[in-house]
Amino acid sequence: MIFKKVVPTIFFLLTCLFITSALRADISSSDLRSRFQLPSSEWVWVKGKDSHDFLNIDHKKLGKALNIAGRTDTIAFDAKTYLTEVRKLLPEDKKNYGDAQINLVETKNLFGKEWVAVKISAPDGLKQEMWSRKISTTQVLLLLYTGIGEPFDQYHGDFDKILERASSL
């Protein structure tokens, strides 16, 4: 008698588990790109470097001097560990990060999701923010906002729109 009550419950729980894991499957870069739009008409799409890049936009007037990029990576650990490891590697890239101030990884709740972030500033005025969060059991999303001087602060609201959209994934 108890067997008849337990089996349907177990079957229901396994079905829920299967559906949940299917919903949390990795998202392809092309599917991710289709979920984003330019934050304003002042931005243009540019080609990414590899298949993990789903977002790469430059400011129309400033070109590469102001860029928003996004990529995914497959990992077996959390987003904070991922970004901490990325942060450790940055000083080895002397050409791009040699004299830069690289802040510690911070955890922030943004648009209802937990994000981890690293802020970087170089003596030449270059600023960069790296934001990351887990979007599936094996996939991490990394967003980068890079700019020089005042435009970095001036257009940060556009990057916030991208962060908000990425929080809905």
Image (cartoon, helix red, strand yellow):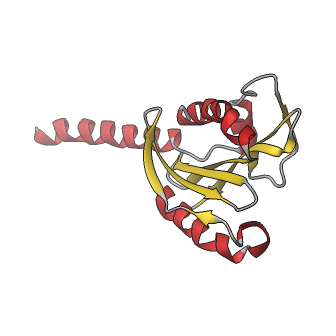
Q: Quadrant of the N terminus?
A: top left
- Residue at position x 60%, y 33% in the image: 160
To which quarter of the image does residue 59 belong?
A: top right
**Residue at coordinates 70% horizontally, 30% vertically from top-left?**
36
Q: Position of residue 25 (x, y in %)?
A: 56, 45
Residue 16: x, y in percent?
Answer: 38, 37
* Picture layout, residue 143 above or below residue 57: below
Name of the residue lying farthest toward the top: 41
Q: Closest to the observer: 122 or 167?
A: 122
Tell me how many marks there are.
0
Where residue 135 sits, quadrant-wise, is top right
Q: Position of residue 75 (x, y in %)?
A: 57, 62
Q: Does residue 120 sit above or below 150 in this rendering? A: below
Q: Is residue 117 left or right of residue 100?
A: left
Residue lying at 73% horizontally and 73% vertically, measured from the top left? 93
- Relative image position of residue 149 (x, y in whole percent): 73, 46
Q: Name the side, left or right, on which 38 lies relative to 168.
A: right
Q: Is residue 136 visible?
A: yes
Which of these two is toward me, 75 or 141? 141
Viewer-nearest residue: 34 or 118: 118
Report if residue 76 is visible in the image.
no
Q: Is residue 49 above or below residue 99?
A: above
The residue lying toward the viewer, choosing from 49 and 87, is: 87
| x 56%, y 69%: residue | 85
Q: Which image quarter holds the C terminus? A: top right
